[in-house]
Image: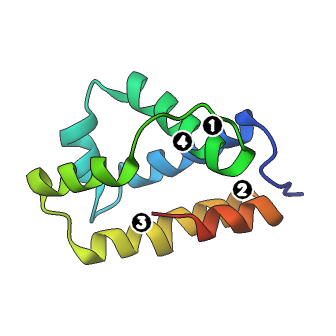
Amino acid sequence: MKTDIETRIDIEKLVNTFYNKAKTDELIGYIFEERLAGKWEHHLPTMYSFWASILLGEASYRGNVMIKHIELNKSVSLKKESFQNVGKTLFIQNIDDLFEGNVAEEAKNERL
């Protein structure tokens, strides 16, 4: 039985599972291999804090995700279909595979 996203452990499960899928995706996998190789130890805790701040009300994230994606786009040239794939397919499907409930629905509406 699926549960809602309720704890930081749930956030870590959500983020880790998403990135494991994203790293092997045909449209966006290369981005993670090029940009985050050797940096996962820093990146993942940042993403845990980002999502915990949004979904659980923690005040643990300090930063601006949009600026990071704009900077990334300057060097990688992200395509519209790449964002659609992440947002509509991988991210939402990942949530649906793992969780159900009000916070899970909120997470799907908060995707970037």
- Which kind of residue does numbered mark 4 sit on? Phe
**Residue picked out by circle 2:** 98
The numbered mark, 1 or 2, whose residue comes first in the sequence reads 1
Q: Secondary structure at mark 3?
A: helix
Inter-mark Cα distance, 4 to 3:
17 Å
User: Which mark is in front, 4 or 3?
Assistant: 4
Q: Is residue 82 left or right of residue 98?
A: left
Looking at the image, which residue is at 72% across and 34% down? 9
Inter-mark Cα distance, 2 to 3:
16 Å
The one nearer the camera, 64 or 52, is 64
**Residue picked out by circle 3:** 86
Instruction: Look at the picture and state if 28 lies above or below 50.
Output: below
**Residue picked out by circle 4:** 50
Circles 2 and 3 in contact, beta carbons < 8 Å? no
- Which kind of residue does numbered mark 1 sit on? Glu
The one nearer the camera, 70 or 91, is 70
**Mark 4: few, some, or many residues within 10 Å (few <14, many ≥20)?**
many
Q: Position of residue 29 (x, y in %)?
A: 29, 53
The one nearer the camera, 48 or 28, is 48
User: Which mark is in front, 2 or 3?
Assistant: 3
Q: Position of residue 17 (x, y in %)?
A: 56, 46
Looking at the image, which residue is at 46% across and 53% down? 21
- Toward the right, the furthest residue is 1
Pick the quarter of the image with the C terminus: bottom left
- Which kind of residue does numbered mark 2 sit on? Leu
**Mark 1: few, some, or many residues within 10 Å (few <14, many ≥20)?**
some
- Toward the left, the furthest residue is 75
**Residue picked out by circle 1:** 12
Inter-mark Cα distance, 1 to 2:
12 Å
The numbered mark, 2 or 3, whose residue comes first in the sequence reads 3
User: Which mark is in front, 4 or 1?
Assistant: 4
